[in-house]
Each structure stands twice: as C-alpha cells, then as structure tokens.
Image (spheres, grey):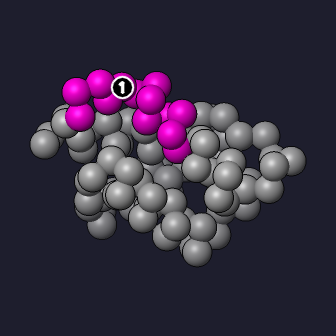
Amino acid sequence: MKPNLTSLWIEEAIILFLKNEIYDPSIHLDKHTNLIESGMDSFSLLNMLMFIEKKFNICIPQEEINETRMKNVQNLTDLIYDLTKKE
C-alpha cells in the first residue's frame, strides 16, 4: 500500500480523471453521481478501469466489476481502498 493513500485522495484522483477524460465538462460529477446514468459506456468503463489499475497499481478482480461497484465514485473508492490495504 502506498504510505499516504487515503480514501479522499483516491476519490479526488478518480473524479479528476473522469472530469478530464470521460465526461463532458457540463456534467456535474461528485462521489455520489450515478456514473452509468451520467453517460458511462463500455468503452469509458474500460478506460476508467485501466486508469485505476495503473494509478493505484492494483488488479480489480473480475467479480468486482459489477453494477454495484461501478455505480459511483464512492463505491469505486471503497473498492480501491480495500484492494490496496490487502497488498
């Protein structure tokens, strides 16, 4: 685990990526925004997963890639935090 890896840092990194790489700037995005309802498609999901794996040096297990875990930034943050604590 990275020494200063906090939930807030993870959340901010994901939101920044989504705002810069995935979503139109006019879309309001916070940790509770439903990503699928806001326009996430399969290509965007793949890009986001690749970003997460590179940024946090983790591999997200296939069984964790589901509608509940991918629903919003809060759920993703919790998943990433849990996975990084296991290392």
Q: Is residue 45 above or below residue 77?
A: below
What's the residue type where badge 1 is placed? Thr
The x, y position of residue 28, in whole percent, is 78, 40
State left or right for residue 81 relative to residue 41.
left
Residue furthest bottom in the image: 43
Q: Is residue 12 magenta?
A: yes
Which image quarter: residue 15? top right
Residue named by callout 1: 6
The x, y position of residue 81, in whole percent, is 31, 36
Front in this rendered view, residue 17 or 44: 17
Q: Which residues are magenta?
A: 2-14
Q: Give the residue at x 62% y 51%.
A: 18
Front in this rendered view, residue 6 or 70: 6
Q: Give the residue at x 34% y 43%.
A: 80
Residue 60 shows in this picture: yes
Which image quarter: residue 23? bottom right
